[in-house]
Image (cartoon, helix red, strand yellow):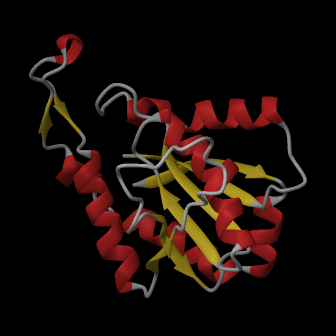
């Protein structure tokens, strides 16, 4: 695979290349090691592409996981203890949130990486919420979000997020004082 789009959110590129250059180079190298054609294995059942061979996001994610972990990058889970003091009246939940967690795909030397071949809402959540949370928990300083380009996403199931979407949204949203530096990488087969 190759990186064909780079978007610097909140000075992400400048800070990552200056302070986390080795980690950035590792991420770029990992992307090139993924042989995307091996993961074009999913047969579509969708009306508009019935029978067409598509890239499998699950298998792509698994491939990224294997290569990242071989380079000593690891997922990081944080258990969630949800507050109950905001319940009103005599409400008592029937289901507990025991075991709930938030997870960053890969962390190494205070760099958090998310690989996103999922729905659009997850891409925005990663950059605008999850990375800030992991920063506030003193786990990461910067983030890298890896997403497919529109052309690549078109060869997956419908609804997969893509680079052009998040760039437009982040430019329209602007930067908040709680946002951390994030580098968005758009990849293709």
Q: In which image quadrant can residue 84 be found? A: bottom right
**Is 17 or 143 nearer to us in this picture?**
143
Q: Quadrant of residue 109?
A: bottom right
Q: Quadrant of residue 132?
A: bottom right
Q: Nearer the viewer, residue 25 or 121?
A: 121
151 versus 81 height, above or below:
above
Q: Residue at x 46, y 49 (%)?
A: 92
Q: Can the viewer see residue 106?
A: yes
Q: Is residue 37 above or below residue 78?
A: above
Question: Which residue is at the far front?
Answer: 90
Left or right of 34? Residue 146 is right
* Left or right side of 6 for 42: left
User: In x, y percent, where is residue 93?
Assistant: 43, 49
Q: How many numbered dots are placed on residues in this image? A: 0
Q: Residue at x 48, y 76 (%)?
A: 76
Residue 78 placement (x, y as % from top left) = 51, 73
Identified at 44% across, 63% down, the residue is: 31
The answer to whether residue 184 of the structure is visible from this angle is no
Viewport quadrant of the N terminus = bottom left
- Please state if 140 lies on the left or on the right of 19 as rendered: left
Please state which of residues 131 and 42 is positioned toward the viewer in this rendering: 131
Q: Residue furthest top?
A: 48
Residue 181: x, y in percent? 78, 61
> Is residue 31 positioned above or below 177 on the image?
below
């Amino acid at each position: 695979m190759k990186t064909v789009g780079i978007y610097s959110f909140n000075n992400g590129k400048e800070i990552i290349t200056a302070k986390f250059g080795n980690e950035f180079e590792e991420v770029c190298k990992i992307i090139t090691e993924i042989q995307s054609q091996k993961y074009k294995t999913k047969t579509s059942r969708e009306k508009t592409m019935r029978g067409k061979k598509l890239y499998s996001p699950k298998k792509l994610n698994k491939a990224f996981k294997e290569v990242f972990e071989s380079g000593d990058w690891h997922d990081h889970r944080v258990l969630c203890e949800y507050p109950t003091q905001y319940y009103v009246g005599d409400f008592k939940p029937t289901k507990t949130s025991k075991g709930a967690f938030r997870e960053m795909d890969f962390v190494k030397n205070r760099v958090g990486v998310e690989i996103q071949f999922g729905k659009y809402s997850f891409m925005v959540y990663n950059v605008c919420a999850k990375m800030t949370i992991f920063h506030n928990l003193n786990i990461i300083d910067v983030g890298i979000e890896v997403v497919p380009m529109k052309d690549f996403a078109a060869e997956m199931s419908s609804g997969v997020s893509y680079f052009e979407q998040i760039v437009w949204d982040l430019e329209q949203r602007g930067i908040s004082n709680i946002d951390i530096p994030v580098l968005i990488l758009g990849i293709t087969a």
